[in-house]
Image (tube, rainbow, N blue to C red):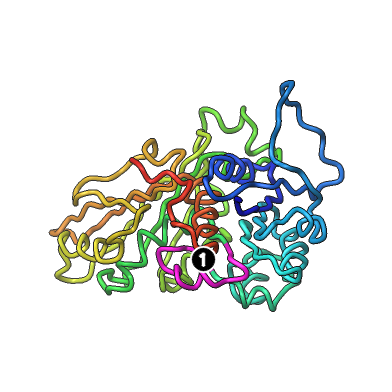
Amino acid sequence: MKIRAGIVGFRGYSGMELVKILAAHPSVEPVLMEHRADAAPEAHPLGWKGPERIAAAAEAARGAGVEVVLLATPADVSMQLAPEFLDAGMRVIDLSGAFRLRTVERYRRWYKEEHTQPGLLAEAVYGLPEFTREQVKGARLVANPGCYPTAANLALRPLAAAGVIDRACGVVCDAKSGVSGAGRKPSLKTSFCEVTENFSAYSILGHRHVPEVLLTSGLEEREFSFTAHLLPIHRGILETIYFRPAEGVTAERLLEEYQRAYAGEPFVKLYAPGTVPDLRPVQHTNLCLIGFRLDDAARRAVVVACIDNLGKGAAGQAVQNLNLMLGLPETEGLSCAW
């Protein structure tokens, strides 16, 4: 018997990716949970049989044998639904930003809204498994990280923790994402004619993913500059990160710190010093690829980190967390080939 996992928000890009991954998962069966009364029916070919569909309510989930619920919903919807499922004894993985920032003050500042579930905000485990694996295993509520912070923290935390960054000189993260990262809700900015043959920066000096990077990397806000850009492609994130290494730090030392942090990690792959990844190898995978170059004479370092914003940046990482919570092999149902 497969474990049943409910998916709320299955029509969005991250939700659709969850359905796709779990439909092929050897140990987990997806159940689609409808939370929108006005949702238009979808067209399917004759004879099509998809996952079971139920209402996004605890009673319906209990009746369907759902053990864990994945919320691919806006933050306000996640705050509304998460307590209901948790009170019914189910575990929850939330893909929105509702439970990532730990305090209501921080949430208010960056999301410009009030948080309605402060107790759950304090309880939630930040689900970046490479750093919080043991906490995720026993968690009731996991806050799935944002796509930009996933790449940034995997690139920065080992180096910041080892003291090999000259933090007085600051860190600059120039991040670029495919359009699916903006979600499926229509808007002028993400319409075809606005995006194609174009390239734009957005949320300058106020992107809500910044505090996630600070909380995990250990950097201070004054030390970290982040700018997001919209690429005219469907999926993928590439972040170019600039910093000065501490005095005497060599390329070999940077590689050693990365190798120490990610030895045995199935989804983080490192390039040899002087070489860097591009986007194509990470698309449709749960991988994060990291490479860097170091100019010893000028004390300049550049790190390039790539993920799929719908994979390791959203649905893939959610399934990675799901596997850990259910005691399954962490890589089950996920692509770690490159």
Tell me the amino acid under the disc marked 1.
Answer: Glu
Residue at 72 percent across and 56 percent down: it is 65
> For the residue carrying disc 1, how many other residues have a C-alpha within 10 Å: few (<14), some (14-19), or many (20+)?
many
Question: Which residue is pictured at 68% across the width and 44% down the height?
Answer: 10
Foreground: 205 or 135? 135
- Closest to the observer: 64 or 274? 64
Query: As displayed, is residue 139 above or below residue 331?
Result: below
Residue occupied by mark 1: 212
Residue at 24 percent across and 49 percent down: it is 271
**Residue at position x 53%, y 35% in the image:** 234
Task: Give above or below for 114 relative to 208.
Answer: below
Quarter occupied by residue 142? bottom right
Judge left or right: residue 286 versus residue 138. Answer: left
Position in image of residue 276 (x %, y %): 27, 45
Q: Quadrant of residue 79?
A: bottom right
Q: Secondary structure at mark 1?
A: helix
For residue 136: magenta? Answer: yes
Relative vertical location of residue 39 with respect to residue 45 in this rendering, above or below: below
Residue segment shown in magenta = 126-143
x then y, percent, for residue 277? 31, 43
Residue most extreme to the front: 1
The answer to which image quadrant residue 295 occupies is: bottom left
**Residue 311 relative to residue 4: left or right:** left
Q: Is residue 184 left or right of residue 151?
A: right
Q: Is residue 151 left or right of residue 48?
A: left
**Relative to residue 305, is residue 106 depicted above or below?**
below
Query: Measured from the top left, where is residue 135 in percent x and y?
Result: 49, 73
Is residue 79 within the magenta segment? no
Nearer-the-camera pick, 20 or 63: 63
